[in-house]
Image: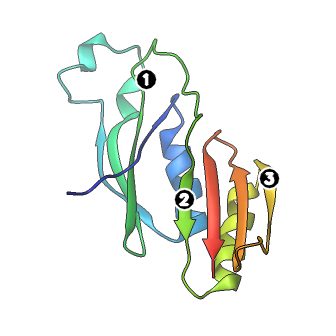
Amino acid sequence: MQIESYLFFNGNCEEALDFYAKVFGGKALNVMRYEGSPMEKELPPGYGQKIMHSTFESEGARFMASDGMPGTPAPQYGGFSMSVYVPKDKARAQEIFDGLAQGGKVTMPFSPPFWGGMFGMVTDKFGVPWMVSTE
């Protein structure tokens, strides 16, 4: 069994995936667009190039993402955080944290917590909450 996160965006999934590629160094795979799908005729003009489904991968980690259907409410991310653990590489973890913070909001600075290592929390510019840690 595998449990993975699936993030929905409000028409800016491609922008988010490009941002995550810069932050994590990975890339979006299996990108499917609404254009050519059975739903294409129901979509407003220009929506065909939005992302219907994608998988983002970096260094063995992955999550899925897409643009929600037109007319659905904008995503409200709450009650969870995406968690990134970078083993034994404080500099890389700091780099990821700083990257996610660009245009976002730091909710807990990246610093040593009482349990050891380094830990920080940030909400990125797309409203997705992240926790970044290393030992």
Q: Is residue 6 left or right of residue 123?
A: left
Q: Earlier in the sequence, mark 3 or mark 1?
A: 1
Q: CA distance from mark 2 to mark 3?
A: 14 Å
Query: In percent of the image, x 57 and y 48: which residue is there?
Result: 81
Q: Amino acid at mark 3?
A: Val
Which tag is nearer the camera, tag 2 or tag 1? 2
Count of marks, rendered view: 3
The three-letter amino acid code for the residue at tag 1 is Gly
| Contact, mark 3 vs mark 1 (Cβ under 8 Å) | no
Instruction: Give the residue type at disc 2.
Output: Ser
Compared with residue 40, is residue 21 higher up or lower down, i.e. above or below?
below
User: Where in the figure is residue 9, as x and y percent of width and height?
Assistant: 50, 34
Q: Is residue 122 left or right of residue 17?
A: right
Residue 106 got which mark? 3
Q: Are marks 2 and 3 in contact (CB under 8 Å)?
A: no
Q: Secondary structure at mark 1?
A: loop
Label 2 and label 1: CA atoms lie apart by 34 Å
Asked which secondary structure carries label 2, the reply is: strand
N-terminal of the pair, mark 2 or mark 1, is 1
CB-based contact (under 8 Å), mark 2 and mark 1: no
Mark closer to the observer (3, 1)? 3
| Label 1 crowd (10 A; few <14 / some 14-19 / many >=20) | few
Query: Going 75% across and 66% down the picture, which residue do you hit?
Result: 98
For residue 46, the mark is 1
At x 70% / y 74%, what residue is drawn? 115
Q: Position of residue 76 (x, y in %)?
A: 58, 27
- Label 3, label 1: how many angstroms apart (C-alpha)? 34 Å
Which residue is at the front of the view, 68 or 48?
68
Q: For label 3, count other residues whose C-alpha is less than 10 Å away and answer few (under 14), some (14-19) or many (20+).
A: some
Residue 82 pos. (x, y %): 54, 52
For this rendering, which residue is in front, 7 or 31? Answer: 7
Q: Which mark is residue 83?
A: 2
